[in-house]
Image (spheres, rainbow, N blue to C red):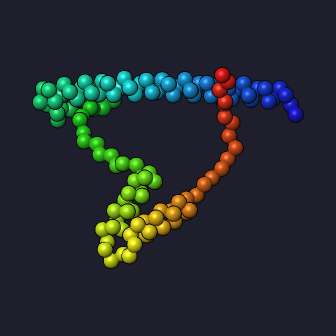
Amino acid sequence: MNNDALAHNVRGWVHYDNMAASFQKQITNARKQRDAFEEQITALLQQHKIPNAVIQISGGKLQLQEEKSVSSLTMKALTESAHSFFKGHPEIPNPDKMAVELLEHIKTQRITTSSLRLKKLKTT
């Protein structure tokens, strides 16, 4: 085995892993700052009763728009949804059993993939 090549690649991996972690922290901070400014701008536009204002900026425009989001499809949410669905159909015998069977089927049909990855373990 070529130890120089391994050492070179390990140094490169560590360098870029550290860089990615640093950028991730910067991104998190930038998003927090942006969100704080967004809250202030929204409050000011609503306070001055101009929620439909279009603000011209370099590279585009800013405007308040309604954004809808849907809750995540977690196993807990699926379980509750399946139970409420089957209980809402009185023609289905044993709705709780049917909900459990459906969820077990969904769980067994999920595809799991596996790959080898380097992972940095923190020393204490």
Q: Can residue 108 be seen?
A: yes
Seen at 24% across and 26% down, the residue is 41
Give the residue at the far right of this rendering. Answer: 1
Report x, y in % for residue 62: 26, 32
Report x, y in % for residue 16: 63, 27
Seen at 81% across and 29% down, the residue is 5
Identify whether 105 is placed above or below 33. below
Identify whether 101 is placed above or below 26. below
Identify whether 25 is placed above or below 72. above
Report x, y in % for residue 87: 33, 67
**In which quadrant of the rendered view does residue 44 lie?**
top left
Quadrant of the frame with the N terminus? top right
Horizontal side of residue 48 vs 54, given as left or right = left
Quadrant of the frame with the C terminus? top right
Report x, y in % for residue 55: 23, 29
Seen at 76% across and 26% down, the residue is 8
Give the residue at the far left of this rendering. Answer: 49
Horizontal side of residue 25 vs 37, given as left or right = right
In-front residue for pair 115/65 = 115
Seen at 33% across and 77% down, the residue is 91
Q: Can residue 16 be seen?
A: no
